[in-house]
């Protein structure tokens, strides 16, 4: 949708200036203006020949209650051929525009024609069948032949041997029986779940991408190798909502609500009447669920089997927060002890890592904790003592004459970087983690750790002379 938005807003096409290449893309309309169809039919005639233009203008049926304020997604002008403007587009912009352009052009081209042959071979016990086809007229497939956008579904051709005659005898060399089992449905990806939402009439073209993105942000689903997989949190939330709000959290309700919202837009029903009809029974359900809130919360919690190291009386439980799972004391709010949970092996840290005595309250210990922005050191006497120290790097500031040390910091946008503890007196800062190792080429006092995720490579580099070192 972001790439389509760029094509819609406009691309710089040299002397022609900024040109919007596609029409508004957040629509499910299939309507095309008469002017656009006339331009397209004229283009196909000149580009491929009059034999390729469909005799009667092809129109597509629209679904009920579609948002028809805009035309179908199409090129603003069919004369902006993808290959002619490719050098103005990024790789992804070209792919998206080429797909929209080719599909649009194909709508007013004739059907492809195939000569199909079916051969049956009979024997005493078995009957074999093979079929093949040969393309005799490419029709709309011609628009895909010169482009990298391939229409694989319609471009497959299976040719049979030419020396097949009726009545010809063949020998059975071997019979190989095979057993096939029904495969489970494949996991959803972004494309297939969008198709499912469309089929179930949930959401609109303007909200499909937002729905999926929101589920990922809330950690209800995760994207693994292009597949969308429900998380443990997503399964728990889904179960709780269906058990307590079954009338609302189902496809029929969503579909009905979408239709009713359309009826409000068309003036067929009154908005307040619809809201009152929905809210009054919903309010009663909400009150009933609210009364058993504590019971519902307990179903989403797990006991760790350990005692709280802070109050010594409470039990440690696994809870869910906005940043995922964490460990807390069940004596909350009397005891506010919390600890992170290792997401990889789902085990609690049984040994608390103590790094020293708190220099602020002189009562508690400084312990290693894990938060939203990674590892940090804090006093275990929290909330009485709120002493928090960033991740210990143990690297002195490389600026000559500065006696500060490097510490982890967070920008206003939540991005981690490394800076000097003497800020603002010393303004040293870097995005890469500093390593206390001297460069043997230029003598710079530190190296920086580089993790190249794309190349799956990790190494050290001198920030001064850029010499690379293998990670040891």
Image (cartoon, rainbow, N blue to C red):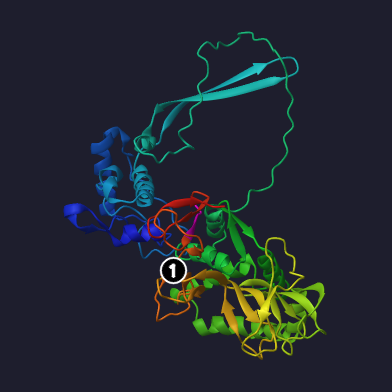
Query: Please, is residue 82 above or below residue 287 in the view?
Result: above
Query: Please, is residue 138 above or below residue 386 in the view?
Result: above
As helix, strand or loop, the secondary structure at mark 1 comes to: loop
Query: Please, is residue 318 above or below residue 66 in the view?
Result: below
Where, quadrant-wise, is the N terminus in this rendering? bottom left
Q: Nearer the viewer, residue 278 or 327?
A: 327
Residue 23 visible in the snapshot:
no
The residue under the point 48% across, 66% down is 207
Q: Quadrant of residue 125?
A: top right
Which residue is at the far left? 15
Q: Nearer the viewer, residue 244 or 305?
A: 305
Q: Nearer the viewer, residue 441 or 336?
A: 441
Q: Nearer the viewer, residue 185 or 253?
A: 185
The residue to which callout 1 is attached is 398
288 falls in the magenta region: no
Q: Is 19 on the left or on the right of 389, as rendered?
A: left
Number of labelled discs? 1
Magenta stretch: give its range: 448-454
452 falls in the magenta region: yes
Whole-percent x, y for residue 323 in the image: 61, 72
Whole-percent x, y for residue 9 in the image: 30, 62
């Amino acid at each position: 949708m972001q790439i389509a938005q760029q094509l819609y807003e406009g691309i710089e096409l040299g002397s022609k200036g900024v040109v919007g290449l596609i029409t508004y893309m957040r629509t499910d309309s299939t309507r095309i203006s008469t002017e656009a169809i006339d331009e397209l039919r004229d283009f196909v005639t000149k580009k491929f020949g009059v034999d390729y233009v469909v005799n009667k203008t092809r129109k597509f049926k629209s679904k009920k209650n579609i948002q028809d304020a805009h035309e179908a997604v199409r090129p603003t002008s069919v004369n902006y051929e993808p290959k002619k403007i490719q050098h103005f587009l990024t790789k992804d912009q070209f792919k998206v525009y080429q797909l929209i352009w080719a599909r649009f052009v194909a709508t007013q081209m004739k059907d492809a024609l195939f000569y199909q042959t079916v051969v049956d071979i009979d024997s005493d016990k078995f009957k074999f069948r093979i079929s093949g086809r040969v393309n005799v007229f490419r029709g709309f497939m011609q628009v895909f032949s010169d482009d990298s956008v391939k229409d694989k579904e319609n471009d497959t051709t299976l040719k049979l041997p030419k020396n097949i005659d009726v009545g010809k005898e063949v020998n059975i060399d071997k019979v190989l029986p095979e057993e096939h089992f029904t495969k489970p449905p494949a996991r959803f990806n972004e494309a297939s779940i969008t198709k499912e939402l469309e089929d179930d009439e949930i959401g609109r073209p303007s909200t499909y991408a937002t729905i999926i993105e929101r589920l990922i942000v809330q950690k209800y689903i995760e994207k693994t190798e292009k597949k969308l997989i429900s998380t443990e949190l997503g399964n728990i939330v889904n179960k709780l909502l269906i058990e307590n709000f079954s009338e609302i959290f189902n496809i029929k309700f969503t579909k009905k609500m979408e239709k009713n919202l359309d009826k409000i837009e068309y003036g067929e029903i009154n908005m307040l009447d619809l809201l009152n009809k929905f809210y009054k029974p919903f309010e009663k359900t909400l009150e009933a669920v609210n009364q058993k809130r504590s019971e519902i919360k307990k179903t989403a919690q797990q006991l760790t089997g350990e005692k709280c190291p802070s109050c010594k009386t409470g039990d440690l439980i696994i809870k869910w927060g906005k940043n995922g799972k964490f460990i807390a004391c069940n004596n909350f709010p009397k005891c506010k002890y919390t600890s992170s949970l290792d997401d990889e092996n789902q085990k609690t840290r049984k040994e608390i890592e103590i790094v020293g005595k708190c220099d602020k309250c002189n009562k508690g210990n400084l312990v290693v904790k894990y938060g939203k922005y990674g590892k940090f050191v804090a006093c275990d006497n929290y909330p009485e003592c709120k002493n928090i120290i960033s991740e210990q790097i143990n690297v002195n500031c490389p600026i000559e004459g500065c006696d500060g040390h490097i510490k982890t910091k967070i920008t206003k946008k939540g991005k981690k970087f490394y800076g000097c503890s003497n800020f603002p007196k010393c303004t040293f800062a870097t995005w890469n983690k500093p390593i206390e190792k001297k460069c043997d080429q230029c003598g710079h006092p530190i190296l920086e750790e580089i993790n190249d995720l794309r190349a799956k490579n990790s190494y050290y580099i001198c920030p001064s002379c850029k010499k690379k070192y293998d990670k040891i």
